[in-house]
Image (cartoon, rainbow, N blue to C red):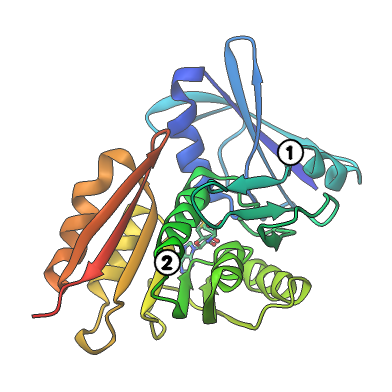
Amino acid sequence: MIRLAVRCEPEQAEFVLAELTVLSPGGVEEVAGEGFVEFAIYGAEGELPDLGEEEAVIAGGTVAVEATEVADDWADRWRTFHKPLLVGDPDRGPVVWIRPPWEPERSGAAEVVVDPGLAFGTGAHPTTRLCVEALIGIARSGGPFGPLADLGCGSGVLAIAAARLGWEPVYGCDNEVAAVEAARENAGTNEVEARFERVDLRAGLPGLAPTTVANLTAPLLEIVAAGLAPESLPETLICSGLLATEYDRVVAAFSPHGLVETGRDQMGDWGSLVFGLEHS
Ligand SMILES: C[S@@+](CC[C@H](N)C(=O)[O-])C[C@H]1O[C@@H](n2cnc3c(N)ncnc32)[C@H](O)[C@@H]1O
């Protein structure tokens, strides 16, 4: 197992993380030090992105790159930064408790036990949290509920959280085999009925559901928008994975389909958008 570390100045960190998150479906470890932030991704030799030997240019800035072989304790290292997370405000409605299997339960919360394996999705990433917040917001007002599709499901955390909040049936897809495997396993652990399959969204869209969540990147969201068919438009669409500087391009991509922005949120440099289908 290789640990590929990228060290940058704190001012670059959000942008570097944004790019690494796209490159690394396995999630990103973050270590802050004096005057630097280090991000690390793990993978087998040949699975990791080729960032060069010692330096790379990421998000327009130069970063230091170091690849080191890690011993078999890498799974334990993963555990040190995979912490449980409470999303939502207990005084305002449902909350979602996302936890790795080795952390304790929390009563009164919609619980999602997630072991991402090699897939993206501990639940802790701001883009995932923004999507869970949006799902909670909809659930708080009685839902739409019904079927839900999760595009770019990673570990399945959003589909499983949605099932816990009341959506059913839930479906997810990802182009990474490891993601589909992790999502299926996590659905089993959570005893949630869910269907996951491998789909490359660049090659075509699966059937969407009345509620669709897409935590992708702005360019991929544009590809999704371009592939929408009038007969299978979602009634409610939650998008994240975009940077807060990219709201306009994502709104512009979906609005020709009658999907009208009904909400937006921001966490750090990351943004989310919620759309509702306007009926003519
Ligand atoms: C930002 S992660 C979101 C994962 C999960 N939904 C979450 O919120 O934690 C984006 C996911 O999209 C997947 N993805 C990237 N490109 C894709 C494509 N062309 N087709 C399908 N999935 C893709 C990645 O493998 C990754 O799991």
Cα distance between the residues tagged 1 and 2:
26 Å
Q: Position of residue 37 (x, y in %)?
A: 59, 22
- Front-most of residues 47 and 236: 236
Q: In this view, does 91 lie above or below 257?
A: above
Please name the residue shown 40% across and 72% down the image.
212
Q: In this view, does 269 lie to the left or right of 116?
A: left
Which disc number belongs to residue 81? 1
Vertical relation: 129 (above or below) 223: above
Disc 1 residue lies near ligand 1 with CB under 8 A: no
Q: Earlier in the sequence, mark 1 or mark 2?
A: 1
* Residue 76: quarter of image: top right
Q: Establish if 279 lies above or below 97.
A: below
Counting from the top left corner in percent of width and height, residue 246 is at 26, 45
Say the numbered circle drawn on residue 213: 2
Instruction: Specify whether tag 2 is near ligand 1 (CB below 8 Å).
Output: yes
Q: In which quarter of the image is residue 161?
A: bottom right
The answer to whether the residues at label 1 and label 2 have Cβ atoms under 8 Å apart is: no
**Amino acid at pointer 2:** Val
Q: Report the residue at 39% width, 81% height from top.
A: 209
Give the residue at x 55% y 58%: 94
The x and y percentages for residue 270 are 40, 41
Q: Which residue lies furthest to the right in this view?
A: 72
Residue 22 visible here = no
Quadrant of the image containing the C terminus:
bottom left
User: Left of 183 or right of it: where is 63?
Assistant: left
Checking the image for residue 259, the label placed there is none
SS of the residue under disc 2 = strand
Q: Which of 74 and 195 is in front in this view?
A: 195
Query: Is residue 84 visible to us here?
Result: yes
Q: Which amino acid does label 1 sit on?
A: Phe
* Label 1 environment density (alpha carbons within 10 Å; few <14, some 14–19, many ≥20): some
**What SS does tag 1 mark?**
helix
